[in-house]
Image (spheres, rainbow, N blue to C red):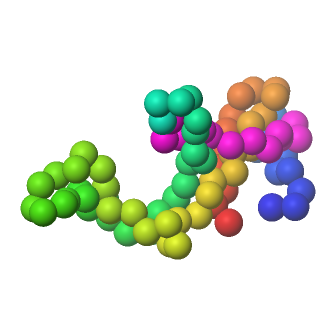
Amino acid sequence: MNKAPTCSACDTTMLAGFVPDKFDATGSAGQLSWHPGKVEEKRLLGLKTGGVRYDKNSAKAITAYRCPGCGLILHFAH
Ligand SMILES: [Zn+2]
C-alpha cells in the first residue's frame, strides 16, 4: 500500500509498522506473515516438531497500520 489508510473509527491517518514474531535466543525477531491454507503440524520422521508446515514462498509479510488516535490496527498482506 503506497498511501497510509485512514482509520475507519476516528478518521485519523494511520502509521505503518509491523508485528515482530519468531523471536530467537539472541532477541532477533522475524516479521509476522500470512500463509494460505490450513495449519498442519510439521513432522520429522513421524514425530511432531512443535511447529507447523510453512512454505516461505507462499507466505506474505504483514504490514500493520496503527491509528495514533484510537489504537485500531489493520493488517495487510500484499
Ligand atoms: Zn482511530
The image shows residue 32 at horizontal and vertical percentages of 56, 48
| Residue pictured at 78% horizontal, 34% vertical | 67
Q: Is residue 18 magenta?
A: yes
Q: Residue furthest left?
A: 46
Q: Nearer the viewer, residue 72 or 38?
A: 38
Q: Nearer the viewer, residue 19 or 3?
A: 19
The image shows residue 27 at horizontal and vertical percentages of 56, 29
Q: Nearer the viewer, residue 45 or 57?
A: 45
In the picture, measured across the screen, residue 67 lies left or right of residue 32, that is: right
| Residue pictured at 24% horizontal, 46% vertical | 50
Stretch in magenta? 12-23
In the picture, measured across the screen, residue 20 lies left or right of residue 66, that is: left
The image shows residue 17 at horizontal and vertical percentages of 75, 41
In the picture, measured across the screen, residue 32 lies left or right of residue 17, that is: left
Q: Is residue 69 visible?
A: yes
Q: Is residue 28 above or below residue 44?
A: above
| Residue pictured at 80% horizontal, 61% vertical | 1
